[in-house]
Image (tube, rainbow, N blue to C red):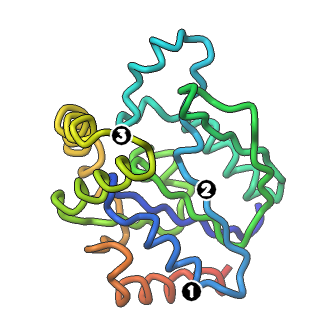
Amino acid sequence: MNNTTIIGIAGGSGSGKTSVTTEIMKNLQGHSVALIAQDYYYKDQSHLSFEERLETNYDHPFAFDNDLLIGNLLQLKNGETVEIPTYDYTRHTRSKETITFEPKDVIIVEGIFALENKELRDLMDVKLYVDTDADLRILRRLMRDTKERGRTMDSVINQYLNVVRPMHNQFIEPTKKFADVIIPEGGSNKVAIDIITTKIKSHIRNH
């Protein structure tokens, strides 16, 4: 296998995972770095009717095809180019379009359940958990879903109370214990991001 460094970044919806990822990628200029969003790996649901697809709980670990994600990461570590799936949110199933992905010095795997699966965790050289207060997370999700996804405020709040919050407490929050570093307040925590970046650069040099 080659010397690819794999970084896992987990945390609840609206915690600031994406901003942390962006800052780390900026700080790793000079290395080839790429992001694999766990959201690419929602399971294919083409065998289900559209009505059945609408019932999918995207905040449950079972929604993700971790076997495919793990297989793709192993291929990349072996120096192979892979075709990464994409998801069609309008049809609620996997798209026919794929993304051609080449091996990199650093691959960041980012998603709410990035640290939930042991086999996936075991591939990671550095594991991070972005820990942000629930009130900030719901406000960010509310703003995103109403502005970018055309959702109503009531639907976002109902989904949060009935699905997102209980799934977070049951499945996401417990994965904090697997993190090497817990980052409070997401991308605004420059000190934590600088320390983590230094650690990642050290790992790259040693390998």
Q: Residue at x 16, y 59 (%)?
A: 135
The residue nearer to you, when weighing 3 against 95, is 95
* Three-letter amino acid code at the position of disc 1: Asn
Q: Residue at x 20, y 41 (%)?
A: 157
User: Tag 2 or tag 3, which sits nearer the N-term?
Assistant: 2
Residue on which the image places disc 1:
27
Labels 3 & 2 near each other (Cβ < 8 A): no
* Three-letter amino acid code at the position of disc 3: Arg
Q: Which mark is residue 36?
A: 2
Number of residues whose C-alpha sits closer than 10 Å to that of mark 2, classed few (under 14), some (14–19) or many (20 or more) = some
Element marked by disc 3? loop
Residue 27 appears at what percent x and percent y? 56, 86
Point out the image quarter for the N terminus: bottom right
Question: Cα distance, mark 3 to mark 2?
Answer: 26 Å
Q: Is residue 137 left or right of residue 83?
A: left
The residue nearer to you, when weighing 153 against 73, is 153
Q: Is residue 76 left or right of residue 19?
A: right
Number of residues whose C-alpha sits closer than 10 Å to that of mark 1, classed few (under 14), some (14–19) or many (20 or more) = some
Residue 78 appears at what percent x and percent y? 79, 56
Is residue 12 visible to us here? no
Q: Is residue 105 above or below residue 192?
A: above
Residue on which the image places disc 3:
151
Residue 114 appears at what percent x and percent y? 45, 52
Q: Residue at x 82, y 59 (%)?
A: 79
Question: Cα distance, mark 1 to mark 2?
Answer: 18 Å
Q: Residue at x 49, y 61 (%)?
A: 8
User: Tag 1 or tag 3, which sits nearer the N-term?
Assistant: 1
Q: Is residue 195 above or below residue 91?
A: below
